[in-house]
Image (cartoon, coloured by chain):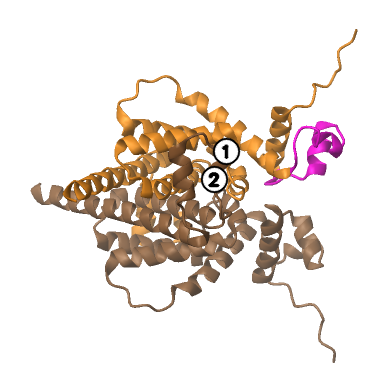
Chain colours: A orange, B brown
Amino acid sequence: MARPSRPLLSVPRIAEAALALVDAGGDFTMAALADSLGVRPSSLYNHLAGREEIVEAMRTLVLEQGAKELGSEAVRGPEEAVRLILRSYREAFARHPRIIPLVTSYTVSAPAVMRWYEELADQLTVLGIARDRLLDVITVLDSLVLGAALDLAAPDEVWDRRSTRSALLAAAIAASPPGRERADRAFELGLDLVLGGLVRLATTASAGSSRT
Amino acid sequence: MARPSRPLLSVPRIAEAALALVDAGGDFTMAALADSLGVRPSSLYNHLAGREEIVEAMRTLVLEQGAKELGSEAVRGPEEAVRLILRSYREAFARHPRIIPLVTSYTVSAPAVMRWYEELADQLTVLGIARDRLLDVITVLDSLVLGAALDLAAPDEVWDRRSTRSALLAAAIAASPPGRERADRAFELGLDLVLGGLVRLATTASAGSSRT
């Protein structure tokens, strides 16, 4: 009647173990993953077709952990909705910065991740972004957010002010606030710059189309 | 009179070997690095104090390779100068995407890398960015460019259009151009949005200060 002491293998459990390997060493192999789960590599293939599916399962796990942060705040309009999506996405990846070049090297196909981009596409369309610019805009936001996630995970001192001969740069580094205040302030400025530009892009496009 | 068959150990040679390990597996250890160079780990310490100095040497190597792309084009004004710096930085890191979370997890101190940020700080100041916003702006540009480097290194198909139930997103993915045209178009839009916003930020700040 004793239960098995080891939990049954599942896709989320495999993804968790793979993520732990990536967090520690920047990558995973099927052999190391099987070893960390105490199973043979062939057992993994009963649950997943291979490396690409494991990356998708990790991507889903990271975003689902981040999505919890979104909460149920009342959202005022599409611009605020886009900001909330991007802030949540950044928080999620900042906890696992080393997975970033892995996920960007595979095609996104996990349904739970696709839903994030679907929501982003919907909100950008409400904001007035034309269909033929939609993927470019999503790509810009993706780049900004992944870069900002890496910056949020960076050490407190991003630049060593003793290593520059520029009084201008040294003063800017010295004036920078400590901890995540530095990263948050820069990210919010990035959102203001890009979203301000997007609102103007949408306005220009609709002014252009009303003229035709 | 025979010359040694193995080139002498040097900081650039150690950085090249470390970069090859990171390109292949996302990270390096001192033991694997010594092994790939055919030396003992203790020999590495005759040239470098440890892991942090190797990361700085790799960061320098990646940027120096990218800097060759800058060429000697005539630069028209600070905005164009900023664009050229950022394009070159993106090209450099897109060739070695897996080093990105490693370099962002260490404080920048290499003089050759610092000079890039010094040039960026100078040009942004000419553009009219106030000193108290300078580091935030540099951080936004850094995030955008590192994210865009990862996007440039991404597979042709970033999103699998068969995996979305959104007709809007599927159509946007299907309409996306192939190869690096997709990544380049999005990056140039990102530069337009952010630099357009920065020019307005500079104008607003100077209008504000002239009123005081």
Q: Are marks 1 and 2 in contact (CB under 8 Å)?
A: yes
Q: Nearer the viewer, residue B189 or B160?
A: B160
Q: Which residue is mark 1?
A: B163
Specify whether residue B164 is painted magenta. no
The residue pinned by badge 2 equals: B159
Quadrant hosting residue B186: bottom left
| Alpha carbon separation for disc pair 1 and 2 | 8 Å
Q: From which residue to which does the magenta span run?
A: A25-50
Q: Secondary structure at mark 1?
A: helix
Q: Residue furthest left?
A: B211
Which residue is outermost to the bottom? B1
Extreme residue in the right direction? A1
- Binning the other alpha carbons within 10 Å of mark 1 as few (below 14), some (14 to 19) or many (20 upward) gives some
Q: Residue at x 53, y 38 (%)?
A: A94
> Residue at horizontal 30%, vertical 29%?
A77
Report in which chain the residue with disc 2 lies: B
x, y (%) of residue A123? Answer: 37, 34
